[in-house]
Amino acid sequence: MNYEHTARRDIRWWGLFVVGAVFFYAGTVVDPATNCDPSGRECAPWLVPIAKWMGAVFGLLGAALLVANPSSGSRIDPATGDLMWWQFRYGPKGGKEGRIHPSRISRIRIVSQSDGMDEVHLYDLDGERQPFFDGEVIPSPIEKWAKGLAEKWPHIRVESV
């Protein structure tokens, strides 16, 4: 039930850094005056500095996230038995967090999306959806994790929509 995902293990932030660096590099080596087609009719020298500075912004954003290395995840607290989850935690504290004892969970709802990015919602016994709990804080496949939790606490219903 323990799961943690950090920025340094997320291909999205590495991709943001690399694409930004490539755009920044291209913007520094391409001469804006030569950014024309062979006939000279189609010319957009203003695109080179825009690509350079957009690359700088995206590259720095990716690098900042890789350096800060925020994490998200979930686990069962051994002291209390609570299911804990967090998003954008820097170090041991902070970020968006939540906790609930599994005996207070009524259902886990999995909503299948056409793009393959399924949503997951956790509800307590009062029918309240728990904040900051989503697919970022649990491992894939979501169904396997939800069924594993329901096996340990049989009163939890797992709904797939």
Image (spheres, helix red, strand yellow):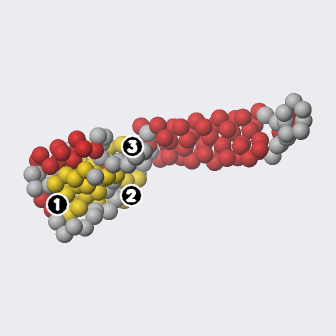
Left or right position of 120 against 65: left
* Res 25 label: none
Q: Residue at x 62, y 40 (%)?
A: 20
Left or right position of 7 against 119: right
- 75, above or below 35, in the image: below
Q: Nearer the viewer, residue 132 or 88?
A: 132
The alpha-carbon separation of the residues under discs 3 and 1 comes to 25 Å
The alpha-carbon separation of the residues under discs 2 and 3 comes to 26 Å
Left or right position of 160 against 64: left
The alpha-carbon separation of the residues under discs 2 and 1 comes to 25 Å
Label located before the other in sequence (3 or 1): 1
Give the residue type that dot 2 points to: Gly
Label 3: few (<14), some (14–19) or many (≥20) C-alpha neighbours in 10 Å: few
Mark 2 and 3 residues: CB-CB less than 8 Å, in contact? no
Q: Report x, y in % for residue 44.
A: 82, 43
Q: Residue furthest bottom?
A: 126
Give the residue type that dot 3 points to: Gly
The residue labelled by disc 3 is 116
In the rendered image, which quarter is residue 26 located in? top right
Q: Residue at x 39, y 43 (%)?
A: 116
Q: Report x, y in % for residue 85.
A: 29, 54
Q: Nearer the viewer, residue 35 or 42?
A: 42
